């Protein structure tokens, strides 16, 4: 079974980044309109990244930019990145803190249907 798994992984190697992390393809045609009304951009002090992680964060961001999974932003109030250690205690994960943005979002009057409701209609 291991040989079969390796063959499948090699056949689909184009969906993996260089170090083997799976990455989704970028959603190039997706537009997300988030209604925040008249709210002004939330500007916060930049969170400091501790020295031992600076190089790793730089390399990870560079990889994500090259894979076109992220892009440069000139927004006045960007959401801050949060560095989280993975379970192995060595590698890092970059997360985005959207808590303040979430407080400003006006909820849609017509949200998407619930899966359970759609299944009943089938």
Image (cartoon, rainbow, N blue to C red):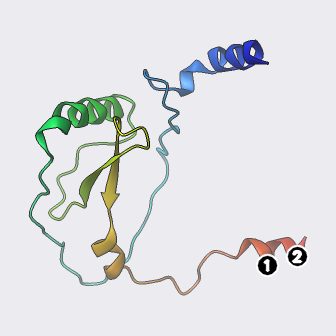
Which residue is farthest right? 122
| Dot 2 and dot 1 residues touching (CB under 8 Å) | yes
Residue 27 vertical position relative to residue 98 in the rendered view, above or below: above
Left or right: residue 82 versus residue 54 is: right
Name the quadrant of the C terminus. bottom right
Residue 29 rendering spot, x and y as whole percentages: 49, 48
Q: Is residue 101 left or right of residue 30?
A: left
Q: Element under label 1?
A: helix
Instruction: Tell me the distance, in whole angstroms, between the alpha carbons under discs 2 and 1.
Output: 7 Å
Crowding around mark 1 (Cα neighbors within 10 Å: few <14, some 14 to 19, many 20+) is few
| Residue that carries the numbered disc 2 in the rendered image | 121
Name which residue lies at 18% across and 78% down: 40
Q: Residue furthest front?
A: 89
- Residue located 58% across and 19% down the image: 13
Question: Which corner quadrant of the image does residue 7 belong to?
Answer: top right
Residue 104 lies, in percent from the top left, at 31, 81
Give the x, y percent position of residue 51.
Answer: 11, 39
- Comparing 102 with 73, the one in front is 102
Can you give x and y, in whole percent of width and height, for residue 100 in the image? Answer: 28, 74
Looking at the image, residue 107 sits to the left or right of residue 46; the answer is: right
- In terms of secondary structure, where does tag 2 sit? helix
Residue 41 sits in quarter: bottom left
Q: Residues within 10 Å of mark 2 (few under 14, many from 20)?
A: few
Which residue is identified by label 1? 117
The quadrant where residue 117 appears: bottom right
């Amino acid at each position: 079974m291991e040989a079969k798994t390796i063959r499948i992984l090699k056949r689909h190697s184009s969906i993996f980044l260089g170090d083997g992390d799976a990455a989704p393809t970028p959603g190039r045609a997706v537009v997300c309109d988030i209604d925040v009304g008249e709210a002004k951009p939330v500007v916060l002090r930049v969170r400091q990244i501790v020295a031992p992680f600076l190089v790793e964060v730089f390399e990870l961001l560079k990889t994500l930019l090259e894979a076109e999974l992220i892009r440069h932003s000139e927004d006045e109030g960007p959401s801050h990145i949060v560095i989280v250690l993975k379970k192995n205690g060595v590698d890092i994960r970059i997360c985005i803190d959207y808590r303040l943005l979430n407080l400003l979002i006006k909820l849609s009057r017509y949200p998407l249907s619930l899966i359970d409701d759609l299944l009943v209609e089938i």
